[in-house]
Image (tube, helix red, strand yellow):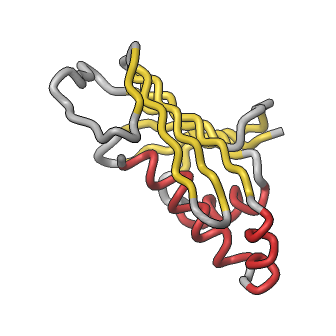
Amino acid sequence: MANQVTLNLPLLGNIIIKIKDDNLYHFFKRQFKNYIVNVVKVDSPNFINISLELENLSIENCQFSRDIKFKDNNFDFVKTSKTQIIGFKYNMNNTIMATIDFEKKLLYYLKKMIKTKYSINHILFYQTILYPIFS
């Protein structure tokens, strides 16, 4: 089960975010407490899904790096580090659907023992929620 949160952000409007990880969800809830409109439990096979409605979305004249694959209104790219792999998939229509898949590497578990739960969720919050919303 995942938590589906509806936010209303002043410049972006309504955003629906599905977060499967409970620790990250509670961290996220504290960060966005003033913008949460609704929270419900839903089935979600992915780590995080983000849905953002936009009017007159146009991406015809954008330039992308070699790492970003763009085909049929879909962006795909992967950020890899020594500790984790984060896959970003954006479906760009009038609604932007972002699916973020998160994979931990073995070194991540060693670092996890050293770091606090807050710092881990802080990093995940920025990489898997804020980055896709504002990118």
Residue pictured at 44% horizontal, 36% vertical: 14
Q: Position of residue 119 (x, y in %)?
A: 64, 78
Q: Nearer the viewer, residue 125 or 32?
A: 125
Q: Position of residue 72 (x, y in %)?
A: 40, 13
Q: Nearer the viewer, residue 62 or 8?
A: 62
Query: Of all residues shown, which one is farthest toward the left?
Result: 61
Confirm whether residue 38 shows in the render. Answer: no
Query: Of all residues shown, which one is farthest toward the bottom?
Result: 114
Residue pictured at 58% horizontal, 35% vertical: 99
Q: Is residue 34 above or below residue 7?
A: below
Q: Position of residue 39 (x, y in %)?
A: 67, 43
Q: Is residue 88 above or below residue 131?
A: above
Residue 47 image-quadrant placement: top right
Q: Is residue 123 above or below residue 29?
A: below
User: Quadrant where the N terminus lies?
Assistant: top right
Q: Position of residue 59 (x, y in %)?
A: 24, 25
Query: Of all residues shown, which one is farthest toward the top?
Result: 72
Confirm whether residue 21 shows in the render. Answer: yes
Q: Nearer the viewer, residue 88 or 66?
A: 66
Residue pictured at 33% horizontal, 27% vertical: 54
Horizontally, residue 20 falls left or right of residue 36, namely right
So how many labels did they put on this image?
Answer: 0
Residue pictured at 46% horizontal, 24% vertical: 91
Horizontally, residue 128 falls left or right of residue 77, namely right
